[in-house]
Amino acid sequence: IIIFVSAYDDFVYSSFEYAPFRFLRKSHLEEELPVTFRKVIEKCISDEESLLFETTDGDTLLRLRDIMYFEGEKNYYVVKMTSGKEYRCRGTMSSVEERIGSYDFFRVHSAFIVNEEYIETIHDDGYLIMKNGALINISRRKLVAFKDSYMQFTRRRFAK
């Protein structure tokens, strides 16, 4: 977690290159520091949130932050991890969507649920590219709702 502290407000924009968690102004340190500490603790707790998945190899506890996306395949779905590892599970995409509904995932297509954290680019042609290079189609009927969801995600992320 990177937190910049500076007396120079002009550095805030150049700090974005390093994806800081926060930028604190020295002149407001006493009021901003306690809030920042609380937000760091909240982030650390949320980063460790996990769910149990019944994979074809047995029950596996997966951290949500390590899941890049889910891909549906008939009566199964595959959990694609940031590490490149994949877990195959019996079940429907609707059941996955229900379980992870309160987290930063979005069902962009009947066969794909993506973790908004790992989206590299969104194209108006109706597809997105994940940080691992995977190209995922976005359903036309979900495009507007997805863009709205992603905008809210981005605002929440930068408001931290």
Image: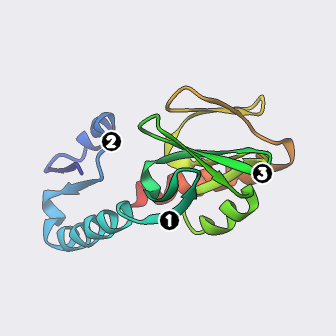
Decide: is 153 above or below 124: below
Between the C-alphas of marks 3 and 2, the distance is 39 Å
**In this rendering, does residue 32 appear at all?**
yes
Tell me, for residue 72, which label it has, or none: none
Residue 36 or 132: which is nearer the viewer?
A: 132
User: Which element carries disc 3, helix, strand or loop?
Assistant: loop
Quadrant location of the C terminus?
bottom left
Mark 2 or 1: in front is 1
Quarter-of-image position of residue 62: bottom left
Q: Amino acid at mark 1?
A: Leu
Q: Amino acid at mark 2?
A: Ala
Residue at the front extreme of this rendering? 57
Mark sitting earlier along the chain (1/3): 1
Tell me, for residue 52, which label it has, or none: 1
Residue to which mark 3 is pinned: 75
Residue 45, position in %: x, y?
A: 32, 68
Please tell me which residue is depicted at 35% across the width and 63% down the height of the picture: 48
Between the C-alphas of marks 1 and 3, the distance is 19 Å
Q: Amino acid at mark 3?
A: Asn
Between the C-alphas of marks 2 and 1, the distance is 30 Å
Decide: is 2 above or below 14: below
User: Which element carries disc 2, helix, strand or loop?
Assistant: loop
Residue to which mark 2 is pinned: 19
Mark sitting earlier along the chain (2/1): 2
Residue 28, position in %: x, y?
A: 18, 65
Decide: is 151 above or below 98: above
Residue 12, position in %: x, y?
A: 28, 44
Please tell me which residue is depicted at 14% across the width and 61% down the height of the picture: 27
Q: Residues within 10 Å of mark 1 (few under 14, many from 20)?
A: few
